[in-house]
Amino acid sequence: MASSSDPDKLMSKADKLTKLSFTRWNADWKSATSLYEQAAIAYRFRKDNEKAKDAFEKASKGQEMISSPWDAAKHMESAAALAKELGYWNEVSDFYHRASELYRECGRPQPASDALAKGASALEEKSPEEAIKMYDEACSVLEEDGKEQMAFDLYRAAAALYIKMEKYSDAAAFFLRLGSAADKCNAINSQCKAYLSAIIIYLYAHDFQQAQKCYNDCSEVQAFLNSDQNRCATKLLSAYEEGDAEEIKRISQSSAFNHLDHMVIRLARKLPTGDLQAIKKADDGEESLDEDDLT
């Protein structure tokens, strides 16, 4: 019997059990998987992360071969965590994706989404584009299962990452997606905060037209129309139309914004950005056209 204190021997014995030969016509995945698991734990205890990662990957394959996708997913997550420690970013993405697929095979959308979210969080600094994709997939897994409420933090995390990347339209789109999800869950407060957040982001990006359109679209939702967040947005957009920088600053510093996500508060505190007079002139021009239409 292989010594439990020597993970190299455990791995060697396990590998032999999975290889076919003249004397072995069937792979003994059950016995091999147990040995891979013992080796993985021993390597991890020794802080030999490279070998531990490989052992967990093989243990995951073994659990899959003996029709235990839940345990396979758990081992794949362990391999992914070690890949993160080692800085193998492609493997972080691949392993967490595989773990998610295995959880879905078990009919477990919540851990499937969680695995993708862990991968996204691990990749935010090194591979933000991949992290965004994984956040998006993590949200979709829950949306498809009608569990949007469980995805609220994921929408926020994706939006925060987009803000870091200075992709403001994409950040606003994720807040609107959060608003839509909140609407399905009847989470009115979260919904209204999400819509106001999207408007603030458009204003920060100095896209007044898109902010106005977003406000108009969101105001068709009765819950938002009657909310404190709608009143804040109305005052803010009016101040922009007037070109009143001091009023914009005053509104942006008000306590009504304190309950938004911290990254949105930071943007709000920096308003106004860009050329306010250009917005005012454009707005004045539209008003004069309207008057001409009436004559």
Image (spheres, rainbow, N blue to C red):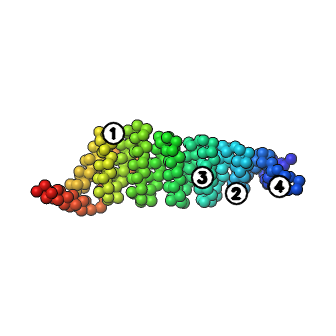
Report how far apart the C-alphas of labels 3 and 4 lie in the structure.
Answer: 30 Å
Q: Residue furthest right?
A: 23
Mark 4 closeness class: few <14, some 14–19, many ≥20 residues within 10 Å? few
* Residue depicted at x 37% and y 44%: 193
Report how far apart the C-alphas of labels 1 and 4 lie in the structure.
Answer: 65 Å
Q: Secondary structure at mark 3?
A: helix
Callout 2–callout 4 Cβ contact below 8 Å: no
Q: Secondary structure at mark 4?
A: loop
Which numbered disc flags the more N-terminal residue, 2 or 1? 2
Q: Which kind of residue does numbered mark 3 sit on?
A: His
Which numbered disc flags the more N-terminal residue, 2 or 4? 4
Residue located beneath label 1 in the image:
223
Residue located beneath label 3 in the image:
97
Which numbered disc flags the more N-terminal residue, 2 or 3? 2
Which numbered disc flags the more N-terminal residue, 1 or 4? 4
Callout 3–callout 1 Cβ contact below 8 Å: no
197 lies left or right of 38 = left
The mark lying in front, picked from 2 and 3, is 3
* Residue 107 horizontal/vertical position (percent): 60, 41
Residue located beneath label 4 in the image:
20
Q: Which kind of residue does numbered mark 2 sit on?
A: Glu
Q: Which mark is residue 49?
A: none
184 lies left or right of 102 = left
Callout 3–callout 4 Cβ contact below 8 Å: no
Report how far apart the C-alphas of labels 2 and 3 lie in the structure.
Answer: 20 Å
Q: In which quadrant is the C terminus drawn? A: bottom left
* Residue depicted at x 71% and y 44%: 67
Q: Which mark is residue 50?
A: 2
Q: Which kind of residue does numbered mark 4 sit on?
A: Leu
Mark 1 closeness class: few <14, some 14–19, many ≥20 residues within 10 Å? some
Q: Report the front residue among 133 and 37.
A: 133
Relative to 239, does residue 111 appear above or below in the rendering? above
